[in-house]
Image: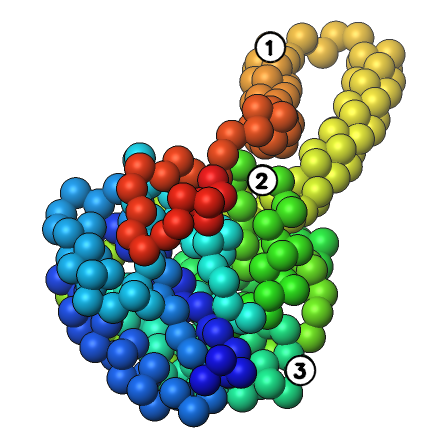
């Protein structure tokens, strides 16, 4: 058994006490089914849950040494939770999985087979998902925008359900970002990547912690972290408006020259002033988003702060 590769399954959790029993049962069954191909470990990061999630993880960790967990001192966000989880894995490959069981753990068998063939990144592509029409359209629009303006292609309809080779994990932990957009970072890294379509199931229990507000924030993070298009749009638009202003000045000069009796345009002056103020505010907002990210990188905050751990040696805690 020692010759078999170790595969780490990482699960970020936040108030998922109602899902843990069903999740562990499927993970345990998966480990039994794949016992002739690999060994598994289950690494949880608890984003400071307020329900019985940590207590349930403690029970599972006492029963099964494959269950390892860290609890953060506060909620550090979903993407940072995933990154912190990656940093505490030991496997030759790492499968990222949500605790709500919308993504099937059993797909690891296909991911594993492709990994053995030499692929370094295998990600799930959502063929269908149980959500409202408007939210689905909004999400697809967001994927399309990020893919189009990003400096590198970002897979559409692909979330954080993926298997990464240890080489990718090692390279990923070298990136410095206070607000990582992991699917964008991983897409930009190269390596041999492959998507697998699947049908996403409904949430097993509890309510989603990722609403429309968090979805918009994640989308903006993807745009500003992986594209300079907003800055270029600001520059090009500024030059266009400057050019139009010059043309307008020439036009009004000759108009006044040949028609000196025309009254002064108070309304047009007000419109131009308000437009100029609004446009400059937009440019300052775009610049501020990039400066904020630079400031946070220079501040060099830890990815997360660990409050407690289960089945970890203190020397293994890397945050």
Residue toward you, 66 or 196: 66
Disc ID at residue 177? 2
How crowded pointer 2 is (Cα within 10 Å; few <14, some 14-19, many 20+) is rated as some
Q: Is residue 116 above or below residue 208?
A: below
Q: Is residue 18 above or below residue 88?
A: below
Residue 97 seen by the camera: no
Residue 108 seen by the camera: yes
Residue 173 is left or right of residue 302, and the answer is: right
Disc ID at residue 118? 3
Q: Earlier in the sequence, mark 3 or mark 1?
A: 3
Residue under label 1, please give it. Answer: 266
How crowded pointer 3 is (Cα within 10 Å; few <14, some 14-19, many 20+) is rated as few
State the residue at coordinates (35%, 77%): 105
Q: Earlier in the sequence, mark 2 or mark 3?
A: 3
- In what element is the residue under mark 1? helix
Instruction: Kindly report the distance in space between the C-alpha atoms of the residues bearing marks 2 and 1.
Output: 49 Å
Residue 134 position within the rendered picture, expressed as x and y whole percent measured from the top left: 33, 62
């Amino acid at each position: 058994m020692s010759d078999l590769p170790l595969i780490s399954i990482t699960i970020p959790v936040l108030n998922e006490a109602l899902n843990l029993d069903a999740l562990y049962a499927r993970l345990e069954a998966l480990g039994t089914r794949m016992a002739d191909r690999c060994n598994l470990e289950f690494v949880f990061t608890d984003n400071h849950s307020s329900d019985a999630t940590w207590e349930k993880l403690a029970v599972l960790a006492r029963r099964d040494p494959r269950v390892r967990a860290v609890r953060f001192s506060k909620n550090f966000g979903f993407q940072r939770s995933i990154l912190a989880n990656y940093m505490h894995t030991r496997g030759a490959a790492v499968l990222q999985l949500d605790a709500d069981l919308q993504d099937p753990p059993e797909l690891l068998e296909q991911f594993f087979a492709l990994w053995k063939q030499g692929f370094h990144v295998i990600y799930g592509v959502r063929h269908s998902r149980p959500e409202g029409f408007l939210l689905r359209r909004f999400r697809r629009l967001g994927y399309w925008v990020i893919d189009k303006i990003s400096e590198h292609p970002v897979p559409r309809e692909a979330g954080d359900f993926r298997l990464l080779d240890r080489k990718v994990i090692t390279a990923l932990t070298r990136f410095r970002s206070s607000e990582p957009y992991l699917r964008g970072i991983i897409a930009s890294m190269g390596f041999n990547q492959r998507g697998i379509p699947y049908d996403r199931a409904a949430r097993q229990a509890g309510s989603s912690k990722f609403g429309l507000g968090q979805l918009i924030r994640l989308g903006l993070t993807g745009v500003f972290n992986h594209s300079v298009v907003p800055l270029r749009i600001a520059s090009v638009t500024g030059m266009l408006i400057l050019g139009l202003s010059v043309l307008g000045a020439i036009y009004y000069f000759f108009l006044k020259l040949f028609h000196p009796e025309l009254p002064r345009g108070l309304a047009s002056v007000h419109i131009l002033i308000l437009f100029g103020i609004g446009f400059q505010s937009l440019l300052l907002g775009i610049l501020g988003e990039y400066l904020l990210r630079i400031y946070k990188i220079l501040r060099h905050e830890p990815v997360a702060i660990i409050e407690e751990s289960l089945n970890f040696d203190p020397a293994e805690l890397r945050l």
